[in-house]
Amino acid sequence: MCGIVGYTGKGPAVELVVRGLEKLEYRGYDSAGVAFLLGGKLRVVRAVGRVEDLRRKLPPEAAAATSAIGHTRWATHGRPSELNAHPHSDGAGNFAVVHNGIIENYARLREDLQRQGCVFTSETDTEVAAHLISRLHEACGDLPRAVERAIGMIEGTFAFAVLSTHYPGRLAATRRGSPLVAGFGQGEMLVASDALPILPTTHDVYYLKDDQVLDVEPGGARLKGEAVAPSDHIHWSAEEAERGGYEHFMLKEIHEQPAALRKLASKLIEDPGAPGDPGGFPRFRLDEMRVTAEDLRKATRVVVVAQGTSYHAGLIARNMIERTARLPVQVEYGSDFRYRDPIVDPGVLVLGISQSGETADTLGAVRLAKERGCRTVSVLNVQGSTMARESDGCVPMHVGPEIGVASTKAFTGQIAALYVLAIHLGVVRGVLTAPEARRRVDDLLQVPQRIDEALAQAAHVREIALKYKDAEHALYLGRGTGFPLALEGALKLKEVSYIHAEGIDAAEMKHGPIALIDEKMPVFVLALQGRRYEKIVSNIQEVKARGGRVIAIASHDDREIAARVDDVIRVHDDRGIMNSIVCSIPLQLIAYHIAVGLGRDVDKPRNLAKSVTVE
Ligand code: M6R
């Protein structure tokens, strides 16, 4: 979704803002723009397309500006065009505004402003804010106060950064619902939609709270006249957010998974427990969860709320938690949960799963659960995100920044973090014995090695992927935890290759989808050995009997599968739920190589945003 960057200091503001926008490209956008002050005048440059298109349009004199705001726009109101791109200004050209979010009452505000003589040049909701701030400033003569009054009249979600000819070297920044963070450098300040544009300058940040209006100057920031100190120190390094020699972030992040999960385990597992000691339970570092053991013991049910890939991780968590803690788990799209008047009570533990911690639908569901008195715990990757701050507690995944729009290491990180949580629940609730808990922890500790083994076959997976790259449709089948993996495999392929793909519970095939099978249909089947193996083999035979082409993801020691299918990708099968992580690797590689084979922009797939901050 839209990205905001603002800078004020001694440096080349426009260049620094444009570099910041490049760091936000991963969020998804269709146009970009900057506003800066030169000789007391506001200059605005905008371009449809990529940040590099914007860079080409910048005049040489822009290099002299020392304060600027910039924006990447993901169109909501009005098509992608130069006129609709941000920044937007008031008629007199004294105020420039960039915005992330949706102004719900913009039509009414626009009519009022037009009646007062304002002339609009775009179809956007944002332009309303520029005119409104300008009008209110005429009355109060103070930038933060004008912004505060404007947001008092605005309904909806927003993050705004404002630059004005009346306040050279100052920016105003505010938010409600959409993220915004300020970075404190030495004599220079930044504001941005997330920390990535700020990291090259500083790791000391302040996350704005809803409706706060930050008055930003090179030397610091103020809230209602009071100086503000940084509230957080970001642990990610600037290098982690670079491609580091890989062709794409998605490929880098696929290959980072062994290291990412090692780090996750080292952060979340304090002590795996002493082998041979019947009382030696593993110990976890879950202090940020802020839910007492008593609350966990008393919990009557778990409700998971999530969207997209995180929802698929939630479906896997259901199997884990039900097995390890014998606690019923319901998995919900946050988008549906929040509008359904759900039946929850204070005995329900609500788990929000979100890589970004900013997904509007998941956040809305967590907020509703809190209102209903539920304990809320979020499994997150982004420190300081809105969900991290609004949930009662959180379980951080520690897998490092995920820039590729298609989630890869965050998905496997979610599964691993949720497994830690599931084992902890099982121990606290007296369901797991010490050896059982230790065995599960050992399985988790073994996973990075298994991922390494799966990655060692990347060339073989690529060969298979390229064989099927020209398919128009693809099916993914699985049973048990194989089903959410089928959903995830299909989602990955759709997102980055634009091939139509569906994930189906293999048991459902006979109830309709089998009609889709013909000799052109590749069918990727999660076919690891286990309780449902014979049934999955029957599904494979049914597909083959109708001419479908089957690619099986199978156990390393399955001797029969090769004769039944067209292609086999083997993974080391430890016969446990951690197989779900290991099987994710070939699914990610298949999607990646098909997309690259088709010439797609895998890190910035069309129409997609990394962080979906509007409903
Ligand atoms: O940041 P979140 O985990 O809350 O995001 C949820 C979905 O938008 C996200 O998983 C999306 O489906 C990804 N693009 C999947 O690759």
Image (cartoon, rainbow, N blue to C red):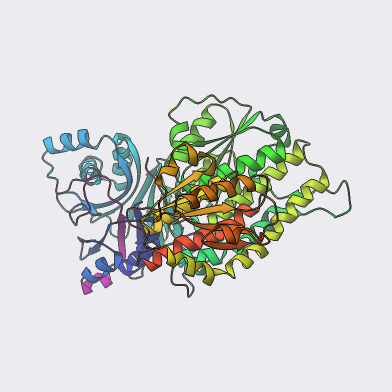
Q: Is residue 168 left or right of residue 408?
A: left
The C terminus sits in image quarter: top left
Could you tell whether 371 is left or right of 599 in the image?
right
Left/right placement of residue 476 relative to residue 175 reads: right
Q: Residue at x 71, y 60 (%)?
A: 446
Question: Residue at the location (56% across, 43% down)?
Answer: 314
Residue 70 drawn in magenta: yes
Q: Is residue 390 above or below residue 586?
A: above
Residue 610 % position (x, y): 41, 53
**Between 36 and 34, which is closer to the camera in this rendering?**
34
Residue situated furthest front in the rendering: 545
The residue drawn where x is 28% and y is 67% is: 65
What residue sits 55% from the left and 39% below the top? 391
Stretch in magenta: 59-81
Q: Nearer the viewer, residue 282 or 438?
A: 438
Q: In this orientation, does residue 118 appear?
A: yes
Q: How many marks?
A: 0
Residue sitting nearer the eye, 36 or 330: 330
Locate residue 612, reporting x and y percent. Answer: 40, 47
Corner quadrant of residue 519: bottom left
Decide whether residue 72 is among the magenta residues.
yes
Q: Is residue 399 visible?
A: no
Q: Is residue 89 above or below residue 327?
A: below
User: What is the x, y in percent for residue 267?
Assistant: 67, 56
What is the x, y in percent for residue 213? Answer: 38, 45
